[in-house]
Image (spheres, helix red, strand yellow):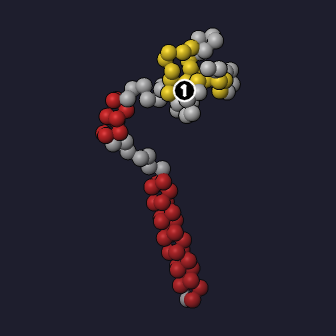
Amino acid sequence: MKKLKALILLASVLFAMNTSFAQTAKSTKEKPKTTTAAKADEKKRPNADARTKTGDKINKEAKGPKGETVYTGPKGGNYYLGKNDEKIYLSK
């Protein structure tokens, strides 16, 4: 009789653990919902991602030696990106 009670108790504990883990696994797979404000912001700035690879401003007045896009760095220096996306600074 004691073994039967222990077996039933063990089975109920395992069942309870199994269902609680299943619920947490489902909740982690949910994707965050995009708000309409975020979508509207993306529409206002269509070239936000195309602005620069480096996050610096594009200098439209200058071109690199082979016509590359020239960027203005944080301290005001101008550079273009080489083959391996390395910054090659232009002399003033």
Residue 55 picture location, percent across and down:
52, 32
Circle 1: residue type: Thr
Q: Residues within 10 Å of mark 1 (few under 14, many from 20)?
A: some
Q: Residue at x 64, y 12 (%)?
A: 65
Give whichever of 49, 78 is nearer the camera: 78
The N terminus sits in image quarter: bottom right
Q: Quadrant of residue 69?
A: top right
Q: Residue at x 56, y 20 (%)?
A: 70
Q: Which residue is mark 1?
A: 72
Residue 6 picture location, percent across and down:
56, 83
Q: Residue at x 50, y 56 (%)?
A: 25
Does residue 81 show up? no
Give whichever of 63, 3 is nearer the camera: 63
Does residue 75 show up? yes
Residue 4 picture location, percent across and down:
55, 83
Q: 11 above or below 71? A: below
Q: 2 above or below 71? A: below
Locate residue 84 relative to residue 77 in the image: left or right.
right
